[in-house]
Amino acid sequence: MDAAVDLTRLALVGNPNCGKTALFNALTGSRQKVANYAGVTVERKAGLFTTPAGRAVHILDLPGTYSLRARSPDEQVTRDAVLGQLAGESELDAFVCVADATNLRLMLRLVLELKQIGRPIVLALNMYDIARRQGCEIDVASLARELGVPVVPTVAVKRDGTRALLDAIDALQVQADVPASQWQEPDANAVRATHKQVEQILADCVRVPDNADRFTTRVDRILLHPVAGLLVLFSVLFLMFQAVFTWAAPLMDMITVLFDGAGALVQQALPAGMLQSLISDGIIAGLGGVLVFLPQIMILFLFIILLEDFGYMARAAFLMDKLMGRAGLHGRAFIPLLSSFACAIPGIMGTRVISSWRDRLVTILVAPLMTCSARIPVYTLIIGAFIPRGKVAGVIDRQGLVMFGLYAAGIVSALVVAMVMRLFFWKGESEPFIMELPGYKIPDVRNVVRGVLQRGQIFLRRAGTIIFAMMVVIWFLSTFPGAPEGATEPAINYSLAGIIGHAIEPLLAPIGFNWQIAIALITGMAAREVAVAALGTVYAVSGEETGGALGALLAAQWSLPVGLSFLAWYIFAPQCASTLAVVKRETNSWRWPLFMFGYMVTLAYAASYLVYHGAMMLFGG
């Protein structure tokens, strides 16, 4: 078969923060899929593209690594994939080594290791434009000669920035009979020899001016300052939470109007009965109560993606290292915990970058305490119902300030729980934190938009599957069996949901929760945001709420202590079932998800009890 049309299996290999994912997006565009590798929870990004010569290429974006001497689960996946030893993956034909052109030293060591595998290699000098702007001079031809592999400059964020790389891939000669790998884990002498070889190559091929990247140096003097840097970090986080409320408000109002209109149309078009109730009270009221928070979730992801692409995430981790170390957490735990603001699942999976099992386990167990995006619907509903709109000092949004306080409570609780765990259960010093700080770069608009839309699609998929299914179940439980003849109470009290809720209510009465809240807590185990939809459906079936007025109804039916107790519960609320399942997969045991569930229920109940009774003393019932 003509080599030009053979399906070539390539892998992108590189250090963290080298622009590898941006290059992957530039090559594949929308022709990519994200899943997990077989048997592990490490994210697998695969895509397809066609070279100018017509060669169809299947490409993998492997997790970042500094060496094939794997020290963490994601680095182990990269090593096994490179060596052709990863379960469920075919052997690779060639590698594209992606290097940050402004910082070649670490990547050249990895290139020399990869050469021992015996596969064709192309070295892509990514962010080449930034290197030149900083005054770096790279003799590409000499570098290729010294390494013995093709070397091409790339600028992943520019339209034609991958042309030279595509030509180099076309020139690759994929071997039918690949020689056996000569790679062996290097000992200390081999590491020193490789380091010496890299230093010689850099001296011969790269010229870096003494004042290279003065911009990064100047900015880092502020952003990495132990005092000013922390003030900037907290200001950025505060701005993010303010934006979640203020920027999203117009879009949320529009979504509310759309669902109100849809519910009214259904009631006009269909006669009163089961079908009308299912569609209007079950589906529209339930889904509308959750989808209204989509703008807030996308704004949160917009901030996270921008900060990561700009190069600030690594610096935030560096700043938080000392604080997290005092709490018994590894410095690398910061990024997984920050990812948990979006969802605890990728945050827990992100702990793979922590090599120590003890440090990794502590991070896994406290990650769910960070305020994930699924809590936003709950927080927004209760804050909107009980906290009046307005400005503090004429500038700060009052509701946004409360939201910031809830996020801060989650962060503080995670640090305190981690400190207790390390103090009483897993004593010992954490491993030192070493991280390569990337240069600052302007985020690529297309990559940012693609990332935000992908996160929005994931949320909509959850709404269309888990939440939709739960709404139908909740509607059924809230409707059947109907009230008996001569019933004097609302029909929902005789339903299965009413029976279950009233049975659990005595356990929750000390923290102020009624039977409707009991139903929301149970169904919220499928996904936290389901709790809001459940409340909407239960009250809609009761005939007390339609459309988007759930917040106003709760403000009328619940006391302020109940609302505050509900917020306190959700600061510590037990994780959704999918998170517990991921913890089981990551720890390979049910012991730790059960431990997590138990301690979080205990903290949630204790916090709600203290808040409820404290608020009763201050504000009355």
Image (cartoon, grey):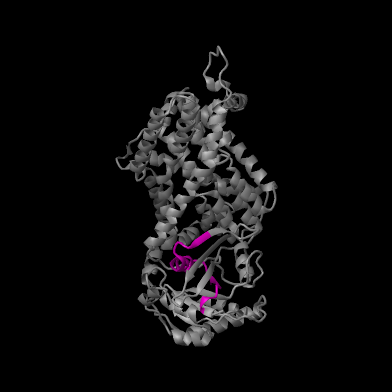
The part of the image, by quadrant, that contains residue 519 is top right
Q: Nearer the viewer, residue 146 or 251?
A: 251
Residue depicted at 51% across the width and 57% down the height? 335
Residue depicted at 41% across the width and 28% down the height? 267
- The magenta segment is 4-33
Query: Where is residue 553 shown, x and y percent of the image?
Result: 42, 27
Q: Is residue 24 magenta?
A: yes
Query: Where is residue 418 shown, x and y percent of the image?
Result: 59, 49
Q: Is residue 88 above or below residue 106?
A: above
Q: Is residue 484 above or below residue 355?
A: above
Query: Where is residue 222 shown, x and y percent of the image?
Result: 39, 61
Residue depicted at 46% across the width and 58% down the height? 316
Q: Is residue 546 above or below residue 425?
A: above
Q: How many marks?
A: 0
Query: Where is residue 37 shown, x and y percent of the image?
Result: 61, 60
Q: Nearer the viewer, residue 543 or 212?
A: 543
Along the horizontal axis of the image, is 609 left or right of 205? right
Residue depicted at 36% across the width and 32% down the height? 388
Q: Is residue 561 magenta?
A: no
Residue lying farthest top? 486
